[in-house]
Image (cartoon, rainbow, N blue to C red):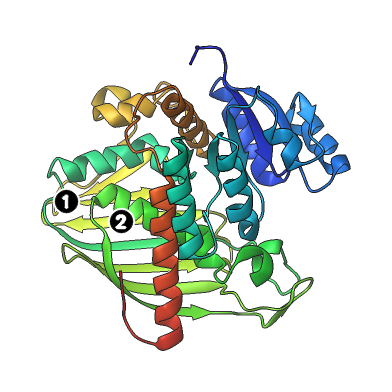
Amino acid sequence: MSHAPLGVAFIGGGFMADVHSRAARAAGARIVGVTSSSPAGSRVAADRIGADVAFDDVDALLADPAIDVVHVVTPNATHHELTTRVLAAGKHVVCEKPLATTVADALDLEQRAAAAGVVATVPFVYRFHPMVREARARVAAGQVGQLFSVQGAYLQDWLLAADDDNWRVSTEAGGASRAFADIGSHLCDLLEFVTGDRLARVQALTSTVFAERASTGPVHTEDLAGVLAQTHAGAVVSLLVSQVAPGRKNGLVLELHGATESLRFEQERPEELWIGARTGSRAHLRNNDELHPDAARLAVLPPGHPLGYQDAFTAFAADTYAAVRGTHPEGLPVFADGVRAARITDAVLASARKGTWSEL
C-alpha cells in the first residue's frame, strides 16, 4: 500500500463518531465519509466531523473504493450485522466495544475477520496512556514482584437520576449488560493488559437502581456491579463498576499490589503513576527520558504537557492504521480482545444470576 493518507469512513454519526473522527484526522487519515440513521442525519454528521461525503446508506459507503478503513460506531446491538457487512466488503474495520452483545456473535466476527485477512480492532484505548504502558513494563520486568492482589474501579454518575436515560439502558439496543459491558470491559481489559495475567473465575453482584427510566420504561440492565475474582496466577481481585456514583465522571482506577511494590493508575490523572513501597512511595510523573521504551513511544508531547483521553484515542487510531500498512504495533487491541471482553461480561452476568462462581 502506498503512503498516501488512508481513507476512513464512519457508520454512525453520534458522539463516538466525533471522538473517532478527531483521532483519525490526528493520525493522518482522510475522512472520506459517514452514514447515519437517515440521509439527513448523514449530512448533519458529515458537516460536524468534516467528512467529504454524506452517504445515504451503508451499501453506498461500502461501495466506495476510496475507503480503506471503516469505523463502526453505532448502538451495540447493530455491531455484528454491520461489521459482518464491512468484512464482506473487504475493508479493514474498527468496531466500538462491546464487539457484540453475545459471545457467539463476537466469536463469529473474530473468525470472519481472520478469514478476510484484514486488520480488525476494538478501541480499548486506555491501553494507550504512556503511564499505563509504564505500569505494564514494570510488571513485565519483575519490578512489582509476585502479584498478590488487584483493586479496580470504573465509576460514573451520568445515569444517577431516574430521568437520566440513553439507548444503552435498553436491552434491545445495548444488550443484556449495560454498566459492565460499557465500562467494566475497559477495566478488565486494562487489568489483564497491565498484569499479563488473566481472570480465571469471577463471582459477581449486580444492581439495577431504577426499575424504570424516563424513555426506556422497564429496565433490565444493571446500573452497577461488584466483582470478586481470581487470576490464573492466584492474585485476588476486587472490582466495582457503577454508572450511579455521584461526582464520579470517569473514575477509572487500577491498583496492583505485589511482593516488591504497588502501582496505581488513575485515568483522570493520566500523567502520573503512583509507585508504592514500604518506604519511599512516590508519584512518578511522566518524564519521557525515564520511561520504558513502549511508554516513551506514546509520549508524543514533552513532560508537563498533559496527554489525555483523546490523545490515547489518537494513538490507538495511529497504531490501527500502521497495522493496515503492514506493521505490528505492540499492544494493539484486536477482535480477540473483544471476544475476551464478551466472555468476561457473560461470566459476570451468569454469576450474578446464579449466585455462584463462574469459571473463565
Query: Residue 312 location in percent, x, y?
Result: 47, 36
Q: Is disc 1 placed on a helix, strand or loop?
A: loop
Q: Where does label 1 land, which residue?
A: 261
* Near-viewer residue (233 or 75): 75
Q: Is residue 359 left or right of residue 87?
A: left
The three-letter amino acid code for the residue at tag 2 is Glu
Sequence-earlier tag: 1 or 2: 2
C-alpha distance separating marks 1 and 2:
11 Å
**Other residues around mark 2 within 10 Å, as few (<14) / some (14–19) / many (≥20):** some
Q: Amino acid at mark 1?
A: Glu
Kindly identify which numbered label has been placed on residue 358.
none
For the point 24% across and 30% down, the residue is 292
Picture layout, residue 253 above or below residue 235: above
Side of 264 where 73 appears, left or right: right
Q: Is residue 111 visible?
A: yes
Q: Is residue 269 visible?
A: no
Q: Residue at x 76, y 23 (%)?
A: 52
Q: Looking at the image, which is closer to me, 84 or 106?
A: 84
Residue sitting farthest toward the bottom:
355
Circle 2 sits on which residue?
A: 255
Position of residue 140 relative to residue 202, above or below, is: above
Q: Is residue 48 above or below residue 219?
A: above
Look at 39% across and 23% down and name the residue there. 326
Q: Residue at x 81, y 30 (%)?
A: 47
Q: Are marks 1 and 2 in contact (CB under 8 Å)?
A: no
